Image: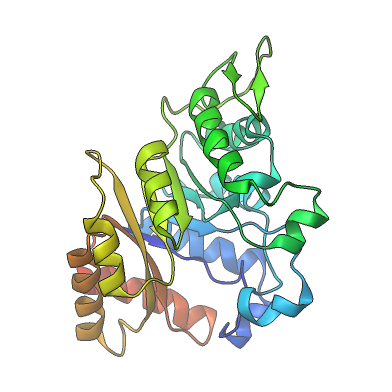
Amino acid sequence: MQFGIGLPIVVTPAGTSAWEFSAGIAEIAEIATRADRLGYDFLTCSEHVAVPTEVEHARGLTFWDPLALFGYLAAITQRIRFATYIVVLGYHHPLAIAKRYGTLDAVSGGRLIMGVGVGNLKSEFELLNAAFDDRGARADEALRALRASFSQRQPRFEGKYYRYDDFVVLPHAVQSKVPIWVGGTSMLSLKRAVSLADGWAPVFIPGEKLANMLASVERPPGFEIVLQSARLDPLGNPDGTRQAIEDMTRLGATRISVKVSHTSLGHYLDQIQAFHDVVGMT
């Protein structure tokens, strides 16, 4: 089992701890370097360009840009990986993703995990002049294009929505195969992940429903199931923390994005240390 950090501060939905609103890059850097030293596998950061005010309480209004943030964190960490959780495929041409995030992979020494999704915030699609009604079909093709383009000096792709040839992309990703995770809540997202990606990163799916969904598909060898924990309290409730991890493992998790309860930066750092000790991370 690999454990990652669902970074605080970078997204501020309902339930965000008060201290996060005044925190910034110094606090994020301290969390990242501590997680790196403790042996956590990855850090997450999501993407929204602009969020309508009417969904502030559900989604949050603060969204740090993953490229800028991870580029900075790559320079001050040694081994921890950087997972976009998630980038909306429809907002970008796949070759732009391959170039921009491929550059991140290069500057980080091959530490990119490309988490992507179809997206469902129609007003943001409209703001960006991005197609909404056929976003699923476009996302499927974009995934195929990304697979053909990451790590390639001269990528080629021919599809309905995207086609390119005779272009050079330098720098590009240094991993021979950049891991791609698909986020989502539906069976469509799971089937998309199984057929076109390397892992599935669902959110907000009850355990029994999740187990039934996973049982209904045949997963290829090495396919990742990346689950988000609820807010854990390894300092105050170590037994409950162990039980939560055991439950997610039984559901099929191969990696877990860890969230902990916290009231300050110091408390957060103590909690991720305690989690490391409680689950016996090496």
Q: Using residue 148 as the reference point, say whether residue 9 is left or right of it.
A: right
Q: Position of residue 135 (x, y in %)?
A: 63, 47
Q: Give how far across and how far down residue 170 sits, in percent.
A: 64, 20
Residue at the extreme front: 133
Residue 49, quarter of the rendered image? bottom right
Which is more toward the observer, 1 or 95?
Answer: 95
Q: Is residue 71 visible?
A: yes
Placement of 174 over or under 216, stated as above or below: above
Residue farthest to the bottom, as pictured: 236
In this rendering, the count of numbered labels is 0
Which image quarter holds the C terminus? Answer: bottom left
Query: Which residue occupies 66% across, 14% down?
Result: 168
90 vs 278: above or below? above
Quadrant holding the N terminus: bottom left
In the image, taking residue 138 as reference, residue 43 lies left or right, namely left
| Residue at the image position 65 percent from the left and 63 percent from the top | 25
